[in-house]
Image (cartoon, coloured by chain):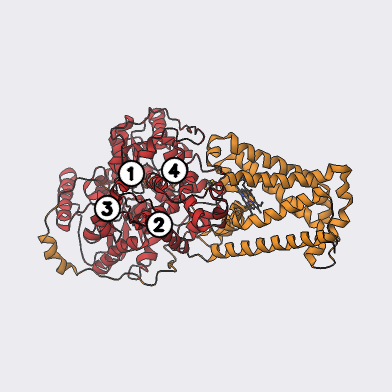
Chain colours: A orange, B red
Amino acid sequence: MSGLTLVFGLFFYLSLAIFLVGFLAKTWKYAFTPAPLRIPQTPAPVSAAGVPVRMFQEVVFFKSLFRGNKLLWIGGYLFHLGLLFVLVEHLRFIIAPASSVLNTLVTYDLYSGFVLLAALTFLLILRVAIDRHLYISLASDYALLLLLLAIASSGLLSRFWDGGHIRMNLPQIKAFIGGLVTFNNIGSVPTNKLFLIHFSLVMLLLIYFPFSKLMHSGGLFFSPTRNQVDNPREKRWVTPWVKTRPTATLPSLEQQAPAAAAAPVQETAEVEG
Amino acid sequence: MAEPAAEKTLLDIITEADTDRNVKGPELTGEINVPRVEEGRIVKGVLSGAKPYAAKPDMMTALGFPDTLVDNWEEAAVKRLGELLEKYKSLQVYLDICVRCGSCTDKCQFFLGSGDPNNMPVARAELLRRVYKKYFTTEGKLFGKLAGAHRLDLKLLGDWYAYFHQCSQCRRCSVFCPYGIDTAEISMAAREVMNAIGLGQKYTDMTIGKLLEIGNNLGMNPKALVNTLESIEEDIEEEDGVPVKLPLDVEGADILLVTPSADFFASPHVESLIGYAKVFHQAGANWTLSSAASEAGNFGMFIGNYTLMQKAATRIHNAIEQIRPKRLVVGECGHAWRIAYSFWNTLIGPFDSLDPKYPAPQHICEYTYDLIKRGAIKLNKEANDEFTVTFHDSCNVARASRMGNRPGGQFTIPRELIKASCNKYVEMDPETTKEKTFCCGGGGGLLTDEIMETRVAGAMPRMQALHAVMKSDGVNFMALICAICKAQFTAVLPRYGVPMDVAGGVHQLVGRAIELGAKE
Ligand code: HEM
Ligand code: SF4
Ligand code: SF4
Ligand code: SF4
């Protein structure tokens, strides 16, 4: 095993470990932080069966985003769709021999790549072109879009650069990545610079993932306004961190009456809700 | 560490208020335009100075908060935020997952009305998120400002105080957020943190104090209540010739009504109270009010303080033990209904002593609707022929609670009541109603005069939508089911050149239409 293979091999395992541990730790925290009160954003499902339906609409169609901003929905939807397809198509570097469904998909991988690139560019343009979006955007928001753009372009470039040299190297890439994933027969790392750049950027993304807003992919499922059932009257919710309810009782009405009579009458003009 | 400035000046800087109480609303066109934000600059800047009065030391101590800004306030704020993060899933998740997509940016009435970019929900939330990132996230610690992290300095604390009091916690932003991020949860947490370091808002803290000490937000003692109810009874008898009663503290009554205390005194609130009384009378119900629970509202929610909210709600639990009713009914109030519907069962439940045949608690609109459906009361629509009516969905009812058995009953039931009480009913622009409703601009503890600019700005979208139907259909009555909405519109309508009696209650219409007297 060459030194370079060792370096990139370790880089891969380190990034993957940070990603997995970080993602799980964060999601664990979201799952187990107590929710003291019922706060579904109504109208909400009135039975538990309705919650997955609501969540499905959000995750698969970005329903609320669609209501909120159509342009953003188009950009965001195409980006995630492109990302999903590209990810699935990347399975060909891991699974051997590739399944037939995957083979069909892979024939179209150029399209997914370009959709991804175009959608990311569009999202970047929205960020600077709409005054409100410009105001709220942070350096890290641009950085993330640029990182994704760099990943997508370096990936796509490798298809054209040098007469598709990298594509011809596919078996080598497969031997390297496939080997890393299966801990078995790790081939030596392809030395093509473009590939190494593409690979390293993806590792950076994995490392950054659990520390960033990319955690929306896990956190969304634990959003109390969206995942709670609207049945607080029918089913009593108990606040996990409240052990007892204050039980002080008032004096009986008879006891109370003389005190009330003795109290001075107070005229109040202020109006409060 | 906090800047070592003298405490008094420190507080002054943070809480100085210099707003125009005589502020007028913009001219009404019927259109809601999204203001332009110029990059990096507070466009108008007016609202950054729109800060409510700070709570006085005695009000703070009465609620168990430090009497004034503590010396180590930065440290104390971070500590309290850390505690909240462990207790509130909403806070933890929402501070982490916002992608700053921008979908919520044009959804808040306070942004639309003021043009101040810090009133965009995500920008508002970011004020707290900065501090979260600085002290609680690896990203913020490593990349600082680039990732939007910032320490809680004096300037930022001032912005917190200003902008977390320009949020009515209406949850409109949450509807349009791909993850349902609820800025109301974030502003509640920010207010809790501010109170914990000794910086409270006067109006809210004072009101909670009165509720805890005396039993209602108005600070009205039982004797005053008795007098008021008697005079209302006299008025009804004079007007309708029917002895409609408003019983108080009747042990063993079937129904306990808990209603916002503004219903006893304020106008047009009292008209709705008369409406409820007539409904109970005509249904032959054995009902009562309670002097111990003479307030449905509970401002503890506005400052995100679980303990105070529970303490205040405990009065209702106690009233149930005293009166031992079979049913618990709640009057017209937005945030009160949210707390009653969504939180009471958790805070003071279970309601084992009540009759399980009825929902506990039940909204007065649900109660009346049921009577109408069963034909138990008759309404004469002609009685309201002078009105062309529209309905303002109260945000807390629309997006944080329900009526009836089906999702969206909170939209249909009040509308059914209105339509049963009058002949002419008109909907406002559907982009401004139901779950997309705008807040009146006075909710969430903003109903105080020193921030009239904020209130007038926040009312703008609703005013435009109202103006549109006033022009097109001659609407002259906007029916409400919220005590704060009623008070807010009464104050704000004239500032937009609209007569204030356009604002009224749903049960005001019901009360006018109901046929009193013997049933066939
Ligand atoms: C459960 C799966 C996921 C769902 C439902 C989801 C949903 C969303 C939604 C609704 C948005 C807002 C619209 C937008 O700005 O595009 C968004 C933004 C974003 N998502 Fe995801 N996402 C998921 C997974 C991922 C993953 C795995 C990535 C990894 C790269 C990712 C990267 C992004 C980025 C970078 C943005 C911000 C785009 C911008 O800056 O405008 N998402 N996501
Ligand atoms: S809509 Fe939600 S995710 Fe998008 S900026 Fe607003 S709060 Fe953040
Ligand atoms: S909760 Fe309402 S008032 Fe507060 S930021 Fe969201 S839309 Fe604005
Ligand atoms: S006052 Fe009315 S509209 Fe405003 S916050 Fe309350 S319920 Fe919402």
- Marks 4 & 2, CB-CB < 8 Å contact: no
Residue at numbered disc 4: B437
Looking at the picture, which amino acid does disc 1 mark? Ile
Q: Secondary structure at mark 3?
A: helix
Q: Residue at x 65, y 45 (%)?
A: A145
How dense is the environment of label 3, judged by Cα within 10 Å: few (below 14), some, or many (20 and up)? many
Residue at numbered disc 1: B13
Q: Are marks 1 and 2 on the same chain?
A: yes
**What's the distance in space between the residues labelled 4 and 2, CA to CA?**
34 Å
- The answer to whether A67 is drawn above or below residue A94 in the figure is above
Mark 3 close to ligand 4, CB under 8 Å: no
**What's the distance in space between the residues labelled 4 and 1, CA to CA?**
35 Å
- Of the 4 image quadrants, the one containing the N terminus of chain A is bottom right
Q: Measuring from the top left, give residue B240's x and y in whole percent.
A: 19, 45
How dense is the environment of label 4, judged by Cα within 10 Å: few (below 14), some, or many (20 and up)? many
Pointer 1 or 2: first along the chain = 1
Q: Are marks 2 and 3 on the same chain?
A: yes
Question: In the rendered structure, the residue with mark 3 lies on which chain?
Answer: B
**What's the distance in space between the residues labelled 4 and 3, CA to CA?**
26 Å
- The answer to whether B224 is drawn above or below residue B124 in the figure is below
**What's the distance in space between the residues labelled 1 and 2, CA to CA?**
18 Å
Mark 1 close to ligand 3, CB under 8 Å: no
Looking at the picture, which amino acid does disc 2 mark? Ala
Residue at numbered disc 2: B77
* Front of the two marks 4 and 1: 1
Looking at the picture, which amino acid does disc 3 mark? Thr
Looking at the picture, which amino acid does disc 4 mark? Thr
- Marks 4 & 3, CB-CB < 8 Å contact: no
Question: In the rendered structure, the residue with mark 4 lies on which chain?
Answer: B
Pointer 4 or 1: first along the chain = 1
In this image, B22 relative to A197: left or right? left
Residue at numbered disc 3: B207
